[in-house]
Amino acid sequence: MIHRVIVAMRNGKLRREMRAILDRPDILVANLKAHLGLWEHLSRESGDLIVADWDIVGEARRIEVLRELPDTPAIVVIQDRPDPETEAALLAAGCDAVLTRGLPAAVLRRTLLALLDKRAKLVQESMTAKRLAGEAPRFTDFVSRSPAMHTFMAVVQRVVHSDVSLFIMGETGVGKEHLARAIHAEGKRTHGPFIAVNCGALPESLLESELFGHERGSFTGATRSRRGWFEMAHNGTIFLDEIGELRPHLQVKLLRVLQNREIQRVGGEHPIKVDVRVMAATNRPIERDMERGLFRKDLFYRLSVITLTVPPLRERKEDIAELVENYIRVFAVRIGRFVSGIAPDAFDALLRYAWPGNVRELINVIERAIILCEGETIALSDLPENIGGQLAPSFVAPPEKPGLPSAALPFQPELPLKQARQTLLREFERAYLIHHLRQAGGNIGMTARKAGIQPRALFDKMKRLHLRKEDFKPSRN
Ligand SMILES: Nc1ncnc2c1ncn2[C@@H]1O[C@H](COP(=O)(O)OP(=O)(O)OP(=O)(O)O)[C@@H](O)[C@H]1O
Ligand SMILES: [Mg+2]
């Protein structure tokens, strides 16, 4: 498999060194730059291996949060100087290795490669084991009390036991992947693997060999042949996430696979029969991509025998209570706090908020609130300022449209300086972008020009900050 390594280190020189150490064609290194909220960023990444500075992790129990990430990464923490106590705490929390800065590159390399190797074996073994242990999300963990979700789930129930391809649409964080996993777990392929592939995360050439595998010598660096995800998903389900990002060349290949039910490895001579249920998902307006010729219509029709559109959280606020309750329970245990509920005014604030980042954003808010919470109940002041709305007067910039994210900045003297500064800067960036997005009516080009950054960078920032250009269109008044 292609290994993904996430490097979260503040020091630029060390990051470059790490890249050199891990320079191998089958290792992809994502360097998280020393931007704001490094921890937040890190806790949302997923990969095979995380290499992080001790001061970014900051607390040994955060290792447990990292271990919960989708790919259950191996974790290496690098300390500035040897500190046996921290080391013991980190190892106890589940860190795979604790190293000290200044170690010879060869030793570091050997350790990291050994960890990657070990993990690759585990991934392959656990794929079937996990299924049997019943760890996959089922419909029972998929909160769907609201009338909107009731109607939606009635349609879902009808496709669970069939083998038809599904196309799952919906805004970011609404639960597309969660739903796909639950459908797989409830259906007749439940004992087969569920393989999720993010089509937007890899360069085209790597994605092709990830999906379909390759034969030895088919390209420089292909020293061994490898099985692709389609082969791994045999008798199970393949979930093609962010399908809208798939380049035209691979769209053609995928179409052929769906038509013929067989794949061909890169550089391979013989087709391989695969029996795979395909589910695809996107949060992009795929119809527009088709009109523009960016996404093939014939592929879309193949993929979307049934299309499911998960409603955004703001259209099913009846689900918020149960989601909040469930995730308070989850994080109270995970973080180790005795928190059992939420104050009425704080809950009202959650109901009023528009949730552009949907369920994922709600989960993040609950986690943060539990970390900040001093009593047994989450208070209004434990919520981010743009949701809780309790601000030092000089910081207030009231929302211009009700229901939209407000441009309010947090003043949190109760937090350590570093953390308070980080949240402030992040929220400043958010407020700044909201201001210009409003002025530009959601026009990305215009906003990027005003801010003096590239549209691509603006997109990335908006994604990180859960901002959607649609929310700034004048017609939504
Ligand atoms: N109805 C739900 N009940 C419980 N948890 C949910 C529900 N919907 C989503 N979640 C949780 O919210 C988080 C985000 O969901 P998921 O990753 O499936 O979203 P997504 O639609 O794939 O987002 P993106 O488009 O950003 O990839 C996950 O932790 C998921 O378990
Ligand atoms: Mg997803």
Image (cartoon, rainbow, N blue to C red):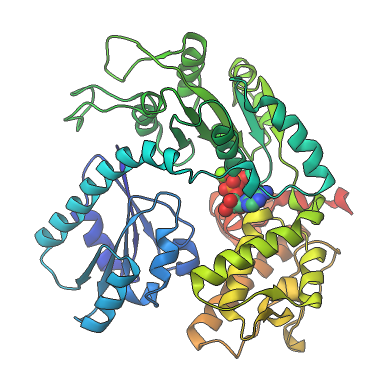
Question: Residue 449's x, y, as percent?
Answer: 63, 56
Q: Nearer the viewer, residue 77 or 475?
A: 77
Residue 59 picture location, percent across and down: 40, 77
Number of marks in picture: 0
Q: Which of the 4 image quarters holds residue 439?
A: bottom right
- Which residue lies at the image location 81% right of the left edge and 55% below the top edge? 318
* Depicted 172 relative to depicted 244: above or below: below
Quadrant occupied by the C terminus = bottom right
What residue lies at 77% left-to-right and 33% top-to-bottom?
A: 154
With respect to residue 40, does 177 lie above or below? above
Can the viewer see residue 173?
no
**Is the residue 201 above or below the residue 277 in the image?**
below
Q: Is residue 40 visible?
A: yes
Q: In which quarter of the image is residue 301?
A: top right
Query: Nearest the camera: 454 or 202?
Result: 202
Which of the 4 quarters of the picture holds residue 127? top left
Left or right of residue 11, residue 377 in this image: right
Residue at (45, 34) in percent of width and height: 195
Q: Which residue corresponds to the image point at 45% horizontal and 50% vertical from the top-left?
A: 70
